[in-house]
Amino acid sequence: MKRNLLEGGPVASARDLVWPGRQTLGQWLAIVGMACGTGYSAWAQTIDANATISSIPVGLNYDYTITLNNTASSTSPIETLWYAWVPGADFLPSSPITVQPPSGWSDAITGGSLGDGYGIEFFTTTTPLNPGNSFIFEFESADTPAQLAGNSPAHPGSPVGTSYVYSGIVSGAAATFVVQPVPEPSSLALLLLGGLLLRQRYRRSS
C-alpha cells in the first residue's frame, strides 16, 4: 500500500482494492473506508471570509485599507487574497499607485490589458491568515471611494470590490465575496443625526 505524503497515512492503490481473495472482506472494507475518509477530509476544507474597505484622502489620491476577516467558522487558513478580480477579469478602474501587504505577504498588480481593469493579488506561503483572525492590506489609488463602491467600468454589472480568497497560492479551498465599503465619518454622522431626528419626531407624535 502507498503512503499519502500530505496526510501521513495509507492510501489505497488499485491493487489494494482487489475483491476478497488476497484480502478478507473486512480488510477490503477498511481500505475503502480509509480512502473515502482521506478524500472527504480534503474536500471538507472550507473558507468563510468577508472584508471591508475604508479610505483616507491624500492630496488628489486615496489611501485604502482592506480588512480581511477569516471567520471562526472556516476550516482552512487563507494564503491568497485577490482583490477586484475573478478568473479572467480585473475590476479596478486604474492601476494602484502603491501597494502595502501585511508582514510576510507579497503582492502583484494584475490586469491592464485592453478591455480589462486592474486587480491586486496578495499572497503568502509563510504567514497564512488563520480562522478567527484578521489582516490589513493597504494600497494608494487615484480611484475615488465612489468608484470602488460601484461597478467596474471595464466589466459593467460587476462590482469593483468582487474578490477571491484561497487556502493556497490560487489553489485549494476558495471563496468569493464583495469587499464592503465602510461609511465615511461624515456619512455616518448624517445617518446618526437622521436617526435621532426621527426618534424625536416619533416621541412628539406619540
Image (cartoon, grey):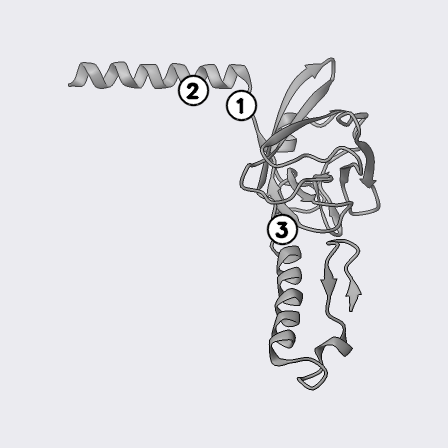
Side of 157 where 88 appears, left or right: right
Please tell me whether residue 29 is drawn above or below residue 186 in the rendered image.
below
Which of the two residues, 140 or 121, is positioned nearer the viewer here? 121
Q: Residue 18: tell me if it is visible.
A: yes
Q: Earlier in the sequence, mark 2 or mark 1?
A: 1
Q: Earlier in the sequence, mark 3 or mark 2?
A: 3
Callout 3: helix, strand or loop?
loop
Q: Quadrant of residue 64?
A: top right
Which of the two residues, 115 or 123, is positioned nearer the viewer here? 123
Callout 2: helix, strand or loop?
helix
- How many marks overall? 3
Which residue position is annotated with label 3? 45
Tell me whether the residue at label 2 lies in contact with that at label 1, contact meaning CB atoms closer than 8 angstroms: yes
In this rendering, the label closer to the viewer, 3 or 2 = 3
Q: Earlier in the sequence, mark 1 or mark 3?
A: 3
Residue 191: which disc?
Answer: 2
Please tell me whether residue 104 is drawn above or below residue 18 in the rendered image.
above
Which kind of residue does numbered mark 1 sit on? Pro
Q: Residue at x 60, y 43 (%)?
A: 177
How crowded is the residue under tag 2: few (<14 C-alpha within 10 Å), some, or many (20+)? few
Image position, residue 37 (x, y; %) = 62, 62
Please tell me whether residue 2 is drawn above or below residue 173 in the rendered image.
below
Which of the two residues, 153 or 178, is positioned nearer the viewer here? 178
Q: Residue at x 46, y 14 (%)?
A: 189
Image position, residue 149 (x, y; %) = 60, 33
Image position, residue 69 (x, y; %) = 60, 33
Which kind of residue does numbered mark 3 sit on? Gln
Please tell me whether residue 201 is drawn above or below residue 93 in the rendered image.
above
